[in-house]
Image (cartoon, rainbow, N blue to C red):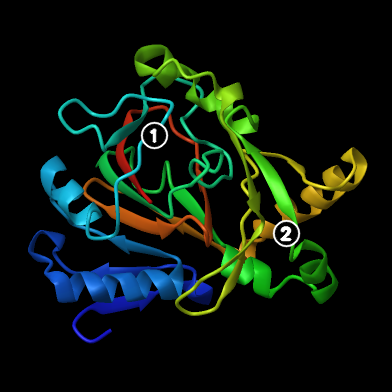
Amino acid sequence: MKNLEVKPFKNNVGALIETDLNSANVETVNEIKKALNNFGVIFFRKQNLSSAKYIEIAKHFGTCADYPMLKGLENFPEITVVEKKPGEKIMFGEGWHTDSTYTKNPPKITMLYSVKTPEKGKGNTRFASQYLSYEKLENNYKDKIENLKAIFSADGPISKTRDNRTAEKGTGVDPKSLWAEHPIVKTNETNGKKSIYLSPGHVTKLVGLNEDESSKLLKFLFAHQIKDEFIYSFAWEPNCLAIWDNYAILHNPVNDFDGHRVMHRITIQ
């Protein structure tokens, strides 16, 4: 990158960018977009973003998307508060998934900003590159999935992790009413890279296959998507920002702590 220091992680799964986002201009944002295209997920440490500034930055990437299940932050409805409170056993969003895949037009990008975190090394988020996942798939499986579609549901396996938050500030939407059908192979229009678009937390079946065929193929693909060689684990501390391409990255927040964790999330169409 011309003006930014970009430090790729192992196997090019993500990269750390050193810059102050409070002073980012259009040229900086364009370089950040290039890095996001190349790596699928990018990270920034030591930021100090107000909610207003955070939303301003997000709008450089597209239109902020509504999250249908929870009300947003007071005065800043674009921001969803992703929180685990002390004493809670289940963490919002734990388990491998891609955000809001059950909507007809799923968000292309997710931004996650850390407000309060447990000790560094606890509560990491693991990111799995689906560029690499597709690249390393055997050709016979690439052929098999090229034109397949899946059913994505808000009532999928991950839905139980929302229960604590929806009890507090849910919108009242029935998760069973939210589902969508999407192709499971995506192509990045900018660089031509293909990725596997499957969210283990939301996918219920593959279209056009019988139940047994669907179950066996999904079991194989879900296991393949999260091989260690495709994963980078990001250690949070306060004032970090992660930005990722939902078409190219799976993520999984690790529930290995008892303290308080507060993250501010924006999704972008």
Q: Is residue 201 above or below residue 183?
A: above
Position of 21 compared to 10: left or right?
left
The residue where tag 1 is placed is 67
Q: Secondary structure at mark 2?
A: helix
Q: Secondary structure at mark 1?
A: loop
Q: Where residue 251 sits: x, y (%)?
A: 51, 50
- Residue located farthest toward the left when viewing the structure as drawn: 23
- Please state, as top left, top right, bottom left or bottom right, where the N terminus lies in the image: bottom left
Label 2 or label 1, whichever comes before in sequence order: 1
One can see residue 19 in this view:
yes
Which of the 4 image quadrants contains residue 76? Answer: top left
Q: Where residue 210 sits: x, y (%)?
A: 90, 42
Q: Is residue 148 above or below residue 106?
A: below
State if disc 1 and disc 2 touch (CB < 8 Å): no
Q: Where residue 220 sits: x, y (%)?
A: 80, 54
Residue 224 badge: 2
Q: Residues within 10 Å of mark 1 (few under 14, many from 20)?
A: many
One can see residue 50 in this view:
no
- Residue located farthest toward the bottom when viewing the structure as drawn: 2
Q: Residues within 10 Å of mark 2 (few under 14, many from 20)?
A: some
In this view, the residue in front, 251 or 68, is 68
Q: Where residue 80 sits: x, y (%)?
A: 32, 34
Q: Rounded to the nearest whole Å, what is the CA distance between mark 2 and mark 1?
A: 29 Å
